Image (cartoon, helix red, strand yellow):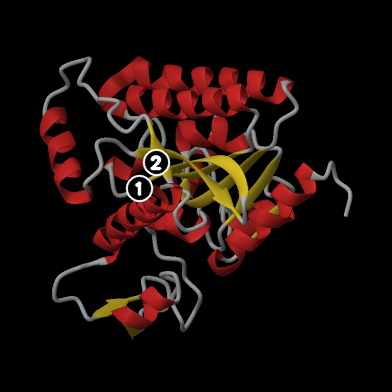
Amino acid sequence: MNNIFAQRRSRLLAMKALRERYVPNEKAMTCPKCSQISERQAVSQNLFVCPLCGYHFPIGAYYRLSTILDSGSFRELFEKLPAGDPLSFPGYKSKLEESRRKTGLNEAAVIATGTVDGRKCVVGVLDSRFLMGSMSAAVGEKVTLGIEYATKNKLPLILFAASGGARMQEGILSLMQMAKTSAALARFSQKGLLYISVLTDPTTGGVTASFASLGDIILAEPGALIGFAGPRVIQQTIGQTLPEGFQRAEYQEEHGFVDQVVPRSKLRDTISQLLLLHQKGGRP
């Protein structure tokens, strides 16, 4: 019976991941970094990393989960949590509906439990295709509930950030999520549990200034933009030319903000090793 349910969960995640990868009639992709054209199938087989220059294309939440979790272990949490329009912001409802139609998501965050090489954990992913992965009240609630679930069940927590920051259409209610998620993580940390934060392109604004920066271990994908305000805004504000590669993952690693830059192809193995070390209390 357990095998039957595991197979169903595996098929469900595979179908959702396939929907995110599939683009009708698109047989080639142009890399925004090297401007070269590659066959879409070749890019897809390379985990949506440019085979010519290593540029990491943005990927959907379910596809991300399918690359990290063991087959059949995926169980989504808080899937039905609704998003709203608390301020009746002009045009916001139509943007939400359009994002739902295009992505198949009800919000920018997906929270799930699963295993990585047999070790159970809670995994959350922000999807930048949904209003740039911006943090709304619903996204903040989902992330907080995921943290609280991990705390209650004494599970490691892995959060993948990909966000333009707090969602402006929800005003102060979106900014409140910074404190809310941070407070939940403080309670999680008091239990001595492991939180791995993975920063992907882009991780900016209120997400950077809250849960994305609070990991016990902070990983990042190569080339990811990581910061609060964008480099253009900073340069205009201070009136100075910024260093080459400023706010990119490699720059942040060099300056101690990121622990390790990990290519997408090695993320699962790296996370698995970190979970194993934590499980053993740091013993090799």
**Point 34% across, 84% down: residue:** 38
- Quadrant of the image occupied by residue 166: top left
The residue identified by callout 1 is: 128
Marks 2 and 1: in contact by CB < 8 Å?
A: yes
Marker disc for residue 164 = 2
Residue 2 in view here: yes
Mark 2 is surrounded, within 10 Å at the Cα level, by few (under 14), some (14 to 19) or many (20 or more) other residues, namely many
Element under label 2? Answer: loop
Residue 243 in view here: no
- 215 to the left or right of 70: right
- 194 to the left or right of 140: right
- Quadrant of the image occupied by residue 184: top right
The three-letter amino acid code for the residue at tag 1 is Ser
**Point 84% across, 41% down: residue:** 281
Place of residue 231 in the rendered image (x, y in percent of width and height, measured from the top left): 49, 48
**Point 28% across, 63% down: residue:** 18
